[in-house]
Image (tube, rainbow, N blue to C red):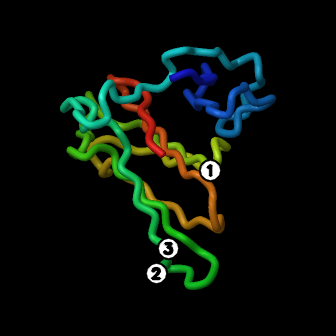
Amino acid sequence: MKGYVCKICKFISINGSAPEKCPVCGAPKTAFEEREDAIKTPQDESNLTELEKKHIPVITVVKACGLIPHGCQDAHAKIGEIQHPMLSEHYITHIDFYIDNEFISRVILTPDKLNPAAALHLKAKGGKLTVIALCNLHGAWINS
């Protein structure tokens, strides 16, 4: 899948253009390169390979937040139907969240100490939630 990738922090713009300034690291538009293969998607969604099952984010939206009772929805993302490893040699470096293809947050993960998952408390009442996870060996993977 096509995207504009920041050469500094690996942020991927999925709204069809490179931003004037990277929302993650602040790099200028000139730091972005358009890549046709920026994000990996499954070959056959009804018959995922083991590699795909370990890399495609699994998203759950919980309409009632247990932490913030009014005006909050929880967005949970775990990486992989089969849990992705978090070893120093093979791990998820970060998880990026988007609403309606616009970036909203990045969670940076540390191998050996964290599980490949993240959660956000959203004010948004609607829109399409998208998650991109970056594996240090197998690239970026997306789900909405």
Q: For the residue labelled by badge 2, is the local secondary structure a helix, a strand or a loop?
A: loop
Residue depicted at x 64% and y 31%: 13
Q: Which mark is residue 14?
A: none
From the viewer's side, name the closer residue of 75 and 144.
Answer: 144
Amino acid beneath label 2: Gly
Question: Could you tell me how far apart the alpha carbons at marks 3 and 1 are, in whole angstroms?
Answer: 16 Å
Q: Which residue is tagged 3? A: 63
Q: Which quarter of the figure has residue 70?
A: bottom right
Q: For the residue labelled by badge 1, is the local secondary structure a helix, a strand or a loop?
A: strand
Q: Which quarter of the figure has residue 16?
A: top right
Q: Is residue 7 left or right of residue 116?
A: right
Mark nearer the viewer, 2 or 1: 1
Residue depicted at x 41% and y 25%: 40
Q: Which residue is tagged 2? A: 66
Q: Which residue is tagged 1? A: 99
Q: Position of residue 111 (x, y in %)?
A: 32, 41
